[in-house]
Image (cartoon, rainbow, N blue to C red):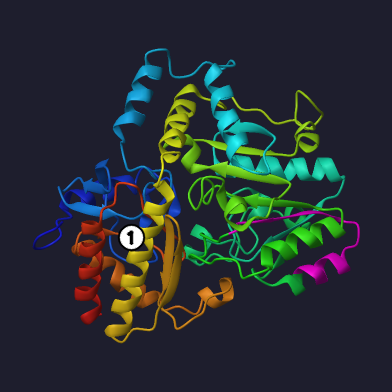
Amino acid sequence: MITGTLRTTKSEEIFAAAQKLMPGGVSSPVRAFKSVGGQPIVFDHVKGAYAWDVDGNQYIDYIGSWGPAICGHAHPEVLKALHETLEKGTSFGAPNVLENVLAERVIDAVPSVEMVRFVNSGTEACMSVLRLMRAFTGREKIIKFEGCYHGHADMFLVKAGSGVATLGLPDSPGVPKSTTNSTLTAPFNNLEAVKALFAANPGEIAGVILEPVVGNAGFIPPDAGFLAGLRELTRENDALLIFDEVMTGFRIAYGGAQEKFGITPDLTTLGKVIGGGLPVGAYGGRKDIMAMVAPAGPMYQAGTLSGNPLAMAAGIKTLELLRQPGTYELLDRITTRLTQGLLSVAKETGHAACGGSISGMFGFFFTEGPVHNYEDAKKCDLAKFGRFHRAMLEQGVYLAPSQFEAGFTSLAHTDEDIDRTIAAAQSVMKNL
């Protein structure tokens, strides 16, 4: 934890140099801290539940590399698996047996997945699954939800969440209207809006894609009956249901949101946890649909680094660790304590706040709530969150630098970490 004033001299120097080298000084927009103000913190190294910056400050980390570090940063068994694989080479560009092992584990765990294709990012997985759903159905239109983020491919940058919401961009310049004309949007948790879209576009909608638990407009769980209603609507209209579980896969349950809620989609996208911290993505689903993918079928998709042995090795070991008894019970317990503690402190200190958690994923908003969708989320007090975020940094707690991002815990977080975080929040909110 940080004692005294937060030291930022080296972070500021490095970021100043980075701004001359990279757009905005970062490789991904949210990292720039634009929505919370101040300079971003430049990390030096991570271990377990903690991160250290280049100025020597230590933080309790609730980002976990935006989700992959579910077992804790630099887990010794994951590092051991990586070192052993590294000795054999970093990339083959050819089949390797580790692909088979990870594929078997994904298929065994995720209810909808009968076959899987590995790619290199969540964006690539979602882009590919969109092409697949269109190829399989012979239809072009898709339905997505306001505030749900499915990567930065053109067709998804319509009322997207994540960095688009954080930066206040309505969509994105450079995206042609012809690309997004076939993307229909509805508010999350609003079945009637989805019914209306199907009614207005009969026989034209290939499918519905969503984050079953929204994490890119802040943490927003599905209302009771919402996912089941989507499953019924898509079947009635001969359309496909796609769960984007890049964030929720292997995090809110070993089999993801579809196991947690008992709703099986037709296709699923995955990422983050299945690579154990290395770049990875995957999409999978029913065999009859996946048979469309080249070289088995006519829908083309390829990638030089797909199935990279290092990513496969890290993913295999991470999933092995997650299979140990009590894993998700521990995640649920510590995350519930954290979320309830933050909300209790907010109430005690007179701040309107709402939020919640599922297993190792959580979030809260500075608004009375409840928050059911992106429009509700936009009512939160962004200025207050910015002040809160900076003050928590000074207390040695690293939260997502945006009100519109979920947070993540890991198996490495302890009760002491949670206690220290809640105590820090209490100190901060008294003076917020």
Q: Is residue 389 above or below residue 204?
A: below
Q: Is residue 204 magenta?
A: yes
Q: Residue furthest bottom?
A: 350
**Residue labelled with disc 1:** 399
Q: Residue furthest front?
A: 325
Q: Is residue 293 magenta?
A: no
User: Number of callouts in the render?
Assistant: 1
Which residue corresponds to the image point at 64% horizontal and 39% vertical from the top-left? 283
The image quarter containing residue 159 is: bottom right
Q: Is residue 318 above or below residue 97?
A: below
Which residue corresponds to the image point at 32% horizontal and 24% vertical from the top-left? 80
Q: Is residue 423 above or below residue 63?
A: below
323 or 257, which is in the foreground? 323
The answer to whether residue 374 is seen in the rendering is yes
Quarter of the picture holding the C terminus: bottom left
Which residue corresponds to the image point at 37% horizontal and 24% vertical from the top-left? 82
372 or 262, which is in the foreground? 262
Circle 1: residue type:
Leu
The answer to whether residue 184 is seen in the rendering is no
Q: Residue 204 in the image: x percent, y percent?
A: 88, 56
Which residue corresponds to the image point at 8% horizontal and 63% vertical from the top-left? 4
Boundaries of the magenta span: 194-212
